[in-house]
Amino acid sequence: MELVQNFPAVSILLCLFAGIISSGLKKKAARWINTALILAEIVLNACTLGYLLETGESYVYVMGKFPAPWGNEIRAGVLEALTALFFCVIMLLSLEGGRKKLADEVEEGKTYLYYVLADLLLSSLLALVYTNDLFTAYVFVEINTIAACGLIMIRQNGRTIEAAARYMIMSLLGSGLLLMGICMLYDLTGHLLMSNIKEQVEILYASGEYKIPLLVTIALISVGLSIKSALFPFHAWLPDAYGYSTVSSAAILSSLVSKGYIFLLIKIIYRVIGFPIFYNSRIIDMLFIFGLMGMVFGSLSAIKENDVRRMIAFSSVAQIGYIYMGIGMGTQAGMSASIFHVLSHAATKSLLFIAAIGLTDVSDGSRKFRHLTGAAYRNKWAGAAFTVGALSMVGVPLFSGFISKLLFAQAAVQNEIKMLPALIVLGISTILNAIYFMKTVIRIYTPVGGNRYDTVTFKDMKSYVAMLICFIALNVILGVSSQPVTDLIEQGLAMFS
């Protein structure tokens, strides 16, 4: 075994150890360990992706050298390595973009805990991406839930505590359904490793045995992960969780946490149940319907909002609907479009949350639209960054959101039955996106008389501007050089199968 094949396991363990070490350190030391950790994770996962592209094959890493059923396995493929690398980049930019604001949002004595939670959250995300064991995935789902809840409530005000309680209730409901599904799968197959479960599921399906229990199992897992990823109508926890947490937490939660659960669902579809069996269960049609509903109702809720951060949060409901619509199409093209949108939305939504805080800071801290008038003149970099994010969400060419919508449209055309509803709702959602995002852009670029608000300069926020530029660059790269990324996604999906 080559050294690079150890990197996925090392990346997960590094995050766990960093969280443990940081729990006994002060704020500054915890911050430096967190930054160094994420940079190391980027290098490790980039090396893993390079190795996989060179060999053209996925591989399995056996933890502790113990074979199944006693041992645990990690599986690395192109799609896993690409997703892990992208998650690490977004985590770094989100934390750095909200770093300066963190001192105002979190009590001085609790700042180190923020980095502990961020380390644990990154560890759980990487484990969800790489693990080949279903029960290990559940364990890290719970670690992810606890860490995400801590990131919400660490701000310590009434709204965040209420949001964290609501998030925990809904998330534990989803976790419970997922656990029930895993238990039933273990009862049916006698295995916990994904590849072994898939073999037994195919045998059971071919023989016609336990059709109803198998269908119930697929439904439990799908609904559980749909609740945790905030698919409409299971999104009640999302607006407050994203809207009232720290800016870095909002960026991380919207761009990474829900996407980790979606990636796990895609892994289960391909590597546990098998795509043909999942398709024939017709549960995929329900995901398609709820995805379409989320695209419309999430956008309508965003239009009605008068709070810029809650508006961005409701936009996430619509964007998650896009992803589930693509999964629900039941085609390779639809799945590729969904995975690309996972990356696109992660890059864009983090950008919007980070840019929004720059606009509210120069509006006396108010998030109401009437106070944001002219904010883009008072903070030019935040205004430009928010405009880029808004144009991407609407689907304007040159930005990643345009490629996402183009891929969804192409996938819809390949499905005769679902083509018409998918294209109609895609068009309606795009119009609704334009209404609330362009309304906001027009508002922040509407001049206001007098010197009522302070204006900030580049010297006041060098690191913040650097992160905005990185986010914009990432968004544009995905928009103008999407073909290599889509090729990697398709290659990774082929390895899944």
Image (cartoon, rainbow, N blue to C red):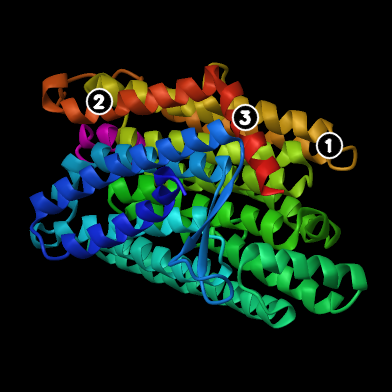
Q: Residue at 72% across / 69% down in the picture? A: 219
Estimate how packed mark 1 is, as few (under 14), some (14 to 19) or many (20 or more) residues with alpha carbons within 10 Å: some
Q: Residue at 76% across / 75% down in the picture? A: 216
Give the residue pinned by disc 3. 486
Q: Nearer the viewer, mark 2 or mark 1?
A: 2
Whether residue 295 is visible here, answered yes or no, is no
Give the residue pinned by disc 2. 466
Q: Residue at 43% across / 67% down in the picture? A: 64
Estimate how packed mark 2 is, as few (under 14), some (14 to 19) or many (20 or more) residues with alpha carbons within 10 Å: some
Q: Is residue 28 left or right of residue 9?
A: left
Residue type at mark 1: give it: Met
What is the distance, in whole Å, between disc 3 and disc 2 at their CAs? 27 Å
Which range of residues does the magenta coloring cover? 357-370
Which one is earlier in the sequence, the residue at label 2 or at label 1?
1
Which one is earlier in the sequence, the residue at label 3 or at label 2?
2
Comparing 482 with 7, the one in front is 7
Q: Residue at 21% across / 32% down in the picture? A: 362
Q: Horizontal and vertical percent for residue 466?
A: 25, 25
**Magenta residue check for 37:** no
Q: Secondary structure at mark 3?
A: helix
Residue type at mark 3: give it: Thr
Q: Are marks 3 and 2 in contact (CB under 8 Å)?
A: no
Q: Is residue 383 left or right of residue 346?
A: left
Residue 193 lies, with reference to residue 287, above or below; the image says below
Give the residue pinned by disc 1. 419
